[in-house]
C-alpha cells in the first residue's frame, strides 16, 4: 500500500505494515482526536475492517482493534460514542469505491482475531495531566500524582492528603466516562481485595463531576498509565464488587436532586440516574 485516504476529521495513510492515522485540528474536529494528533496502528493490532453507510451522504470505514492491542480502547472499555471513535473514518459517499478498495487491502493484511498479549499501539506520551472536579491528576511516566482542590475534594481525601503512586504499586486503571453523571478515574493497586470506597471518598481516584475531566484529557491519561502498568505484568480482570451502602445511595440521590433543581440535569437524566442508583441497593 502506501496511499492516503482523506476523510472528515482524519486522514489514513496506508503503509506496508501499518495505518498512520492523522487527525485534523479544527473547531469541528472532536477534541479527543485533536489531543491524539496521530496514531500508528500496526496491521497485527486489528481484528476486522468494515465499510458501511453513514449519515447524510457518507460512508464509514471502521477498523476494530484486537482486544488488548490498544491501551486507549482498553481504558475506554466500550464507553466512547461513535463520533469519538478514533478507528472510524467518515468519508463522502462518492469515495465509497475507493474506500472499499482500501478496506479489502486491510482485510488481506489481518492476521488473527485473538486477544493480544501486549499493547501493539503506542500510548499517548507522558507527561500528561488534567483537572477533575476534586483534584488535578498528573503522570510523568513513572508515577501518578493527585493534588486535591479545596473546593471539591471530600473530607476523606483532605484527611489522606495529596497522593503519589508509583507505577510499580498499580495493577490497573478504571475509567468511567465524564459523559455520565458519576464519572471518575480510579487507580487499582496490588493487594486491594476489599470493596473500594466510592470514588469521591477514595484517595486513589479523582471524580469528574459535570463539566470537569473531559474525555480528551482523561482518557489519554488513563491509557498512558495503563500502558505503563502493563509493561510490568498483565492487568487483572476487574472483579464485580458488592452492593453499595444505602446511606451512600441516598446521599447521591440527594445530590442528583440538587443538580436537577438547578437545571443542570434534565428530567429524563434525573429519572434514569435515580433508577440506576436505586437498582444498586
Image (cartoon, rainbow, N blue to C red):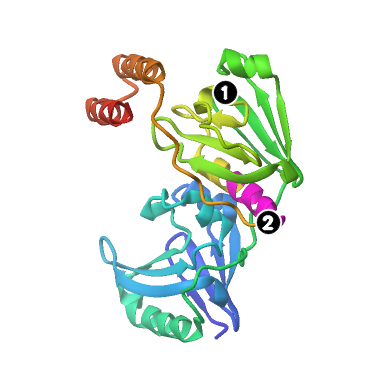
Vertical placement of 98 versus 41: above or below?
A: below
Does the image show residue 56? yes
- Sequence-wise first label, 1 or 2: 1
Q: Residue at position x 55%, y 18% from top?
A: 152
State the quadrant of the N terminus: bottom right
Q: How many marks?
A: 2
Q: Secondary structure at mark 2?
A: loop
Q: Which mark is residue 233?
A: 2
**Image spot of residue 4 (x, y percent):** 52, 77
Q: Nearer the viewer, mark 1 or mark 2?
A: 2
Q: Name the one closer to the observer, 53 or 209.
A: 209
Work out whether 45 lies above or below 28.
Answer: below
Q: Main secondary structure of the magenta part?
A: helix
Q: Which residue is mark 1?
A: 134
Residue 96 placement (x, y as % from top left) = 33, 77
- Few, some or many residues within 10 Å of mark 2 (<14, 14–19, 20+): few
Label annotation for residue 221: none
Quadrant hosting residue 192: top right
At x 31%, y 25%, the residue is 265
Stretch of the chain drawn in magenta? 221-233
Amino acid at each position: 500500500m502506501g496511499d492516503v485516504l482523506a476523510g472528515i476529521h482524519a486522514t489514513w495513510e496506508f503503509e506496508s505494515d501499518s495505518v498512520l492515522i492523522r487527525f485534523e485540528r479544527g473547531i469541528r474536529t472532536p477534541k479527543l482526536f485533536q489531543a491524539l494528533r496521530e496514531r500508528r496502528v500496526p496491521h497485527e493490532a486489528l481484528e476486522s475492517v468494515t465499510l458501511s453507510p453513514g449519515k447524510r451522504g457518507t460512508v464509514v470505514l471502521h477498523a476494530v482493534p484486537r482486544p488488548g492491542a490498544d491501551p486507549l480502547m482498553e481504558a475506554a472499555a466500550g464507553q466512547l460514542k461513535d463520533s469519538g471513535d478514533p478507528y472510524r473514518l467518515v468519508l463522502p459517499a462518492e469515495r465509497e469505491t475507493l474506500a472499499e478498495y482500501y478496506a479489502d487491502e486491510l482485510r488481506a493484511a489481518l492476521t488473527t482475531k485473538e486477544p493480544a498479549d501486549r499493547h501493539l499501539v503506542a500510548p499517548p506520551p507522558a507527561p500528561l495531566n488534567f483537572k477533575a472536579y476534586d483534584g488535578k491528576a498528573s503522570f510523568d511516566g513513572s508515577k501518578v500524582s493527585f493534588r486535591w482542590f479545596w473546593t471539591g475534594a471530600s473530607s476523606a481525601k483532605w484527611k489522606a492528603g495529596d497522593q503519589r503512586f508509583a507505577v510499580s504499586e498499580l495493577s490497573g486503571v478504571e475509567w468511567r466516562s465524564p459523559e455520565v453523571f458519576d464519572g471518575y478515574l480510579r487507580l487499582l493497586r496490588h493487594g486491594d481485595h476489599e470493596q473500594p470506597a466510592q470514588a469521591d471518598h477514595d484517595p486513589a481516584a479523582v471524580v469528574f463531576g459535570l463539566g470537569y475531566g473531559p474525555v480528551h484529557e482523561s482518557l489519554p491519561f488513563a491509557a498512558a498509565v495503563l500502558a505503563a502498568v502493563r509493561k510490568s505484568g498483565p492487568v487483572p480482570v476487574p472483579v464485580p464488587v458488592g452492593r453499595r451502602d444505602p446511606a451512600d445511595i441516598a446521599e447521591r440521590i440527594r445530590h442528583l436532586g440538587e443538580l436537577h433543581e438547578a437545571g443542570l440535569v434534565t428530567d429524563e437524566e434525573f429519572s434514569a440516574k435515580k433508577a440506576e442508583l436505586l437498582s444498586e441497593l
